[in-house]
Image (cartoon, rainbow, N blue to C red):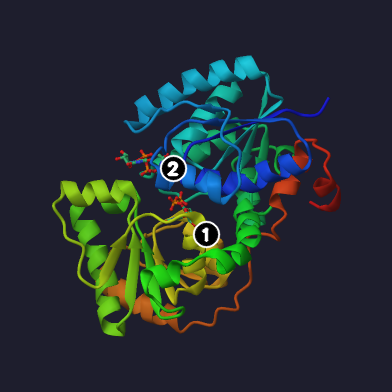
Amino acid sequence: MSTHIAFVLGTRPEIIKLAPVIRACNEGDVPYTVIHTGQHYSEKLDSVFFTDLHLPKPDYNLGVGSGTHGEQTGMMLAEIEQILFDEDPDIVLVQGDTNSALAGGIAAMKLDAQLGHVEAGLRSFDRDMPEELNRILVDHGADLLFPPTDDSAARLREEGIPAERVCVTGNTVVDAVLQNRDIAADQSTALLDLDVTAGEFALLTAHRPGNVDDPERFAQLLEGVNRYAELTNTTVLYPVHPRAEAKLEDFDMVVPEHIRCIEPLNFLDFLYLEDTASLVFTDSGGVQEETCILQTPCVTLRENTERPETLDVGSNVLTGPDPESIVINAFEMRTRDTDWDLPFGDGQAAARILQQCNVETPLTSEVRT
Ligand code: UD1
Ligand code: UDP
């Protein structure tokens, strides 16, 4: 009988990065169950991606919603465990470093099913980030680890994880970008809708608690991006994540005038904007990777990154929140040659992951690990 896979996901980046694996399951008639924790639930952070990426409705939606880390993870854990008892999958796949990944991981670790971790081995070495704790815990409980790069695999081995559990697959975000880049260019009307011209605008995303939960720091980084916008006469579009929106309201903060706030975008529009922007400012993990793949320069508004490959190839630079550092680095990045190497794989990560799960499909027979 074919391997039955259960996917546990709950947030925007997990939906986007697991979509290629779910799509590969569909193409290969692999039995699977999708368990959505409901960590993200606003239409613009959730259902819009199921539509864009042609994913079937989740089999379960736990509707857990927002809360403290303990509340959120605990509620998910109890419900996921019950579903795994009922569905009895062979393998549970989780992706990345969210509370949904942690809950899915803990539930699977203690059951018969094997736990597979997609995007294993990333480290920021910053334990103040909740994601850092989540990724370490999931990596150390997993039976199958799918790091995107050789460096992330080496880190797992340094931490004592047996080599036979680890397989470098590339990052599924490459699959997602390659599958959707041309579709986005064909279908997206974002440039027209937002009245901007390709190559003449910049994009900003900022949602990490370390940046937006502290009013001084949040104001500083907006000030840096605003100064750049003013000095270069560039429109900066900022699709505001709900966490950031809530903080702007709580702190009674006004976003400076050269940054244009917009609603969070669907994947195709956002991908097209990343592809056509002159520069991207971000604190997102996925955006650092996607800009690297799309050969758009990136300025990361953090002091560290769990994606050092982007720094190594020169697609990305770290600035922290200091306005002067943001401006200097943004000027440096906007003129940088963008023909850097692509470190995150060849777009066949999903097939490699299924191959490691002992799933036979036409796709898996074609890839090499
Ligand atoms: C979570 C992940 C983070 C990931 C991000 C992707 C954890 C610890 N954090 O952060 O790693 O980068 O998702 O976007 O798992 N909210 C809404 N609607 C929603 C979801 C959230 O309005 O659909 C608001 C609520 O006010 C909520 C806040 O956003 O309190 C934060 O949501 P939460 O899921 O706790 O964390 P994120 O910041 O989204
Ligand atoms: N994204 C999107 N619309 C937006 C902002 C981001 O579709 O308005 C996508 C982006 O292409 C990337 C993912 O969301 O694939 C990144 O999610 P996020 O920044 O929320 O999480 P992180 O990657 O930091 O965990």
Q: Which residue is drawn at 72% across and 25% down?
A: 90
Dot 2, crowdedness within 10 Å: few (<14), some or many (≥20)?
many
- Looking at the picture, how far across and down is residue 247, in whole percent? 23, 48
Q: In this view, does 258 lie to the left or right of 293?
A: left
2 or 220, nearer to the observer: 2
Q: Quick one: quadrant of the N terminus?
A: top right
Look at the numbered disc 2 and give the secondary structure of its residue.
helix
Look at the numbered disc 1 and give the secondary structure of its residue.
helix
Q: From the Cβ of disc 2, is ligand 1 less than 8 Å away? A: yes
Dividing the image into four equal quarters, which quarter contains ligand 1? top left
Residue pointed to by mark 2 = 131
Pair 2/1: label in front: 1
Splitting the image into 4 quarters, where does residue 190 fall?
bottom left
Q: Which residue is drawn at 55% across and 15% down?
A: 82
Q: Do the residues labelled 2 and 1 touch (CB within 8 Å)?
A: no
- Under mark 1, the amino acid is Leu
361 or 134, nearer to the observer: 361
Tag shown at residue 45: none
Dot 1, crowdedness within 10 Å: few (<14), some or many (≥20)?
many
- Looking at the picture, how far across and down is residue 20, in whole percent? 65, 48
Q: Distance between the residues labelled 2 and 1?
A: 26 Å
Splitting the image into 4 quarters, where does residue 256 fall?
bottom left
Tag shown at residue 268: 1
In the depicted structure, whether residue 236 falls above or below residue 158 = below
- Looking at the picture, how far across and down is residue 172, in whole percent? 63, 51
Splitting the image into 4 quarters, where does residue 319 fall?
bottom left
- Looking at the picture, how far across and down is residue 349, in whole percent? 70, 51
Q: Is residue 167 visible?
A: no
